[in-house]
Amino acid sequence: MEQQEKTIEQRTTRTVIIDCDVHPYPRNTEELRSYMSQPWRERYNGGGRGFYGNPVHGDRLDARPPQGGPSGSDPELLRKQLIDEYGYAYAILMPRAFCNLQPDPDFGNAIAAAYNDWLADTWLSKYNPDGVFKGSITVNTQDPVAAAREIERWAGHPHFVQVMTDSGSRAPFGQRQFYPIYEACEKFGLPFAIHPGTDGMGINVQPTPGFPTHYIEWHTCLSLGFQAHLVSFLTEGVFERFPDFKIVLVEGGVAWLAPLMWRLDAEYKALRYEVPWLKRRPSEYLRDHVRITSQPLERPDNDAYLLRMFEMMDAEYILMFSSDYPHWDFDSPTRAFPKLPESLHRRIFFDNAKELYKL
Amino acid sequence: MGRHVIGPVAEFPAGTRRMLVVEGRPIGIFNVNGLYYALKNSCPHQGAPLCVGTVTGMTLPSAPGEYVYGREGEIVRCPWHGWEFDITTGKSIFDPHKCLVKTYDVTVEVEDAPGVETYPVTVESGTIVVHI
């Protein structure tokens, strides 16, 4: 497989793009079940969040395969609408297993493992002759020791480039019960990506004060959980304990980052006393340890405001383009951003991801 | 400014639509309750094929907690992000003054029918024409 890979220059004709959030789906529940052993195979019924569904449509209507099956399940259509349409170098695949909502950690582990076996067998090999698809190892954070074993099972695979989990959790991710996962990520050089999902579902807490009424509230407030996770990673000293560990905040919003860091840095001036293991101001850990993906990019009426935000948040080094294909709030690589200076465009759309994932 | 014949009225009933490319422009033509409208088939937001989106109604402006549903068949939602547009005007629902899609005139023209001049001509026998 590796020998067949074309270079980036051979594969792309236009702007070189790495898309850091693309969702592949099994063709049906049975396909995923076939990668499970009993008793999970007979118990698994698929599963998403069950409520807070988008009342309009949850995915791009033109991404539904004409022959049937869910959006994102047909590699030919995905290649046509995304890889070929925009001239991608790589698409980072983020399957949606929703295993973090399971009260039974064994069931959660089985779902995570099945998604990994499925992804490795299909999108990362059968559908991947040119190596354009890079994958994420799904883990189940309610069983960190098992999650670390799952990471080890895939370490060294040529196309898995990171570990991923849902933002839904029972605790902020900087806390020590999760450290077996981060130890494994650091050991194998795999960033830890957090993607929205399972917040307030199953066993998880909802990051708003209680449950909002509408999808528009729930979806807008997804960024709150990301903010809490990030503050936790920083203040708990995770990046001091694991100096080569990196995290990726996927689909959690962008424009909140700079003001949150101003607030945290201000608190640190007095409250460093409480977290003496921090050797730098909290914001100074970002460039070495944190990346954030762009979609759904906030677009104020005045483009200049967003460009200033990019400057304030160090976007040149920490922001990575993502589309969220095939979901409803897809960001087009050619239309979602205001015009950027060429060097900044290249860093956001290519260099930052290339360096993080060592592509 | 071009005149493009789309086809006979009889083959384009209420509630149907067609996508075409006229003078290089992608266009969607809709029959909404017997009246014809044409919109550019490209969403002003991110360029998605707007006119293939769901044709539907909308929740009309109402008091908090009230739902008033109406305008069935007069609204098209973009197939990507779900933004609502009024098919009859091309204007978006959320910001009709600043966010709108180009519209084109559509007329129904009665064709001359040589040799049958004594027959009455009805709208059903007309031809739909879009003007670019």
Image: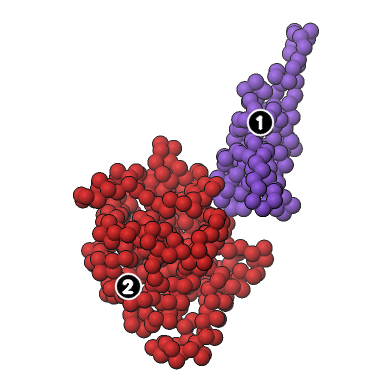
Q: Element type at marker 2?
A: helix
> Which of A146 and A283 lies nearest the eye of the viewer?
A146
Residue under label 2: A178
Q: Position of residue B46 (x, y in %)?
A: 59, 53
Chain letter corresponding to the colour purple: B
Q: Residues within 10 Å of mark 1 (few under 14, many from 20)?
A: many
Residue at 37 percent across and 61 percent down: it is A203
Residue at 22 percent across and 63 percent down: it is A153
Q: Residue furthest toward the left?
A: A38
Q: Amino acid at mark 1?
A: Asn
Q: Quadrant of residue B39?
A: top right
Residue under label 1: B31
Chain bearing mark 1: B
Q: Amino acid at mark 2?
A: Phe
> Which of A349 and A104 lies nearest the eye of the viewer?
A104
The answer to whether residue A151 is above or below residue B17 is: below
Q: Position of residue A357 (x, y in %)?
A: 37, 68
